Amino acid sequence: MSPSKIRHLSLSEEIYSRLMRMILDNKYPDGYRMREEKLCSELGVSRTPLREALIRLDREGILERMPRYGCIIRRLPASGIAELLECRRMLECMTLREYFQNIDMEAVNSLKLRLEEAKKNGDDELRTEILNTDETLHELIVSACGNRFLAKQLKDLQLRCRPYRVLRCAEAGDIPAIISERRNIINSILAGKKADAEKWMQAHFDASRSYYEEQRTE
Amino acid sequence: MSPSKIRHLSLSEEIYSRLMRMILDNKYPDGYRMREEKLCSELGVSRTPLREALIRLDREGILERMPRYGCIIRRLPASGIAELLECRRMLECMTLREYFQNIDMEAVNSLKLRLEEAKKNGDDELRTEILNTDETLHELIVSACGNRFLAKQLKDLQLRCRPYRVLRCAEAGDIPAIISERRNIINSILAGKKADAEKWMQAHFDASRSYYEEQRTE
DNA sequence: TAATGATATATTGTATACAATATACAAATA
DNA sequence: TATTTGTATATTGTATACAATATATCATTA
């Protein structure tokens, strides 16, 4: 057996991951303008690898680089989030339809158990668990996707939704409804009912989307 | 009216566009390893902006950057092209279905005329015109797409197909069949028959895909 | 006072220099 | 001879220095 390859992560890549996490975890306020020198001294690196990291983050839509101006962190307006979710709805439902037979049933089943187990917890922990199972569910769909190109797009879109997911779940009121939303999908998958699974998945996304669409008043 | 903003294109961006075009036009052989210094002297620039351009091209799947090794231009194997086309099939057909009412009928109609006009040409020019109309047709779908995120993905995928498109069309044998493939789509759209249009579009992609799948013997 | 223009400062874009690593080649050893 | 190991070379990764541009400040003028 070959020894697992040692990968000396380049500085640029480390910066990339670190900034990615910071941004996706909402550590920077909306509209925050990143100054290269400032970031450099904070991270203890020089501008070259920092800029290379920023360029990659820009290409992935994590931040926005404007020529001769710099980078800003721009949270999507509610309408933008709705649009992003609409894109995910289309792609994930399609994936569910086209690659239904690839889904890892074992994993879905243990997800079902996890969700039921979670109901025994208090409200705060329950909300966290819902978020986690939600993430797992959508990751399962990516795993089932037999097309690399489509899978990458799904993954990127899911990442971009991350900053908003957290906020919403903390506010949601009707917990039982939220749980049954997920349970319907999971049960349909386990029962092998493709059309139903897709239908419930549509509903799941529609629920999120309308949440943001209602906020358009801002 | 505000004066159209003067955009001093940065060196990095110019390099980016230039390399992009070179690569998509198959100017580099498959597996070509790009050496930074060599590229620099060829383009008359320093390594910093060159590297920034390479990083962006890497993120878009136009080339492959490997840590501590460099960039290589890698053409997809036939199976990869088939997979890429399969992804486009799913996305473009979905877009056609979801945003059918947004399609610019004027443009489709003039496309129809262009295609019929083209038939009067000799074989070489006809092939070129088919390629052009094909591109326009797929661009029309992007334009109709009411979702920014999806539209960007469609565009990126279309770009990545470019290097292969040219090769295939030059080889194709049954020109009349190829023309009717497109005509069926166009006519269905003009007739407002959404389901038919999607069906013919599916067939259109399937034809391309099977062309590459048959080459798997390599 | 409001608007304009000149100057100084700050910030990004690019080039170069240096460091770390990988590749190629030759010598040494079994 | 085949394999290994050390050394030289080439190439990428990072830091710094410089250039071009944008932003802010303040004086000037209508």
Image (spheres, coloured by chain):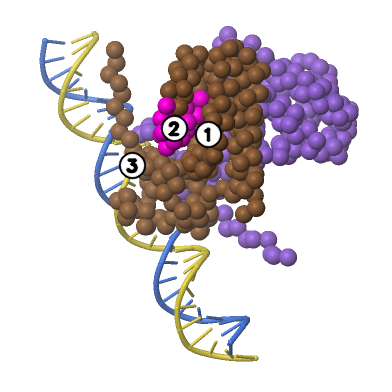
Chain colours: A brown, B purple, C blue, D yellow
Residue topped by disc 1: A175
Precedes in sequence: disc 3 or disc 2: 3
The amino acid pointed to by label 1 is: Ile
- Decide: marks 3, 1 in contact (CB < 8 A)? no
- The front one of B110 and B153 is B153
- Mark linked to residue A11: 3
Badge 3: how crowded within 10 Å, few (<14), some, or many (20+)? Answer: some
- Magenta-tinted stretch: A120-137
Q: Quadrant of the C terminus of chain B?
A: top right
Instruction: Give residue B172's position: percent from left, percent from top.
Output: 73, 18
Above or below, comparing residue B52 to residue A85 in the picture: below
- Decide: marks 2, 1 in contact (CB < 8 A)? yes
Precedes in sequence: disc 2 or disc 1: 2
A131 part of magenta stretch: yes
What residue do we see at 71% from left, 40% from top?
B146
Residue topped by disc 2: A126
Precedes in sequence: disc 3 or disc 1: 3
- The front one of B33 and B57 is B57
Image depth: mark 3 or mark 2 in front: 2
Instruction: Give residue B47's position: percent from left, percent from top.
Output: 42, 46
Same subunit: marks 3 and 1 = yes
What residue do we see at 29% from left, 27% from top?
A6
SS at circle 1: helix
Q: Is residue C15 left or right of residue D16?
A: right
Badge 2: how crowded within 10 Å, few (<14), some, or many (20+)? Answer: some
Q: What distance separates the C-alpha of mark 3 from that of mark 2? A: 38 Å
- Decide: marks 3, 2 in contact (CB < 8 A)? no
Instruction: Give residue A42's position: percent from left, percent from top.
Output: 32, 53
Q: What distance separates the C-alpha of mark 2 from that of mark 1? A: 9 Å
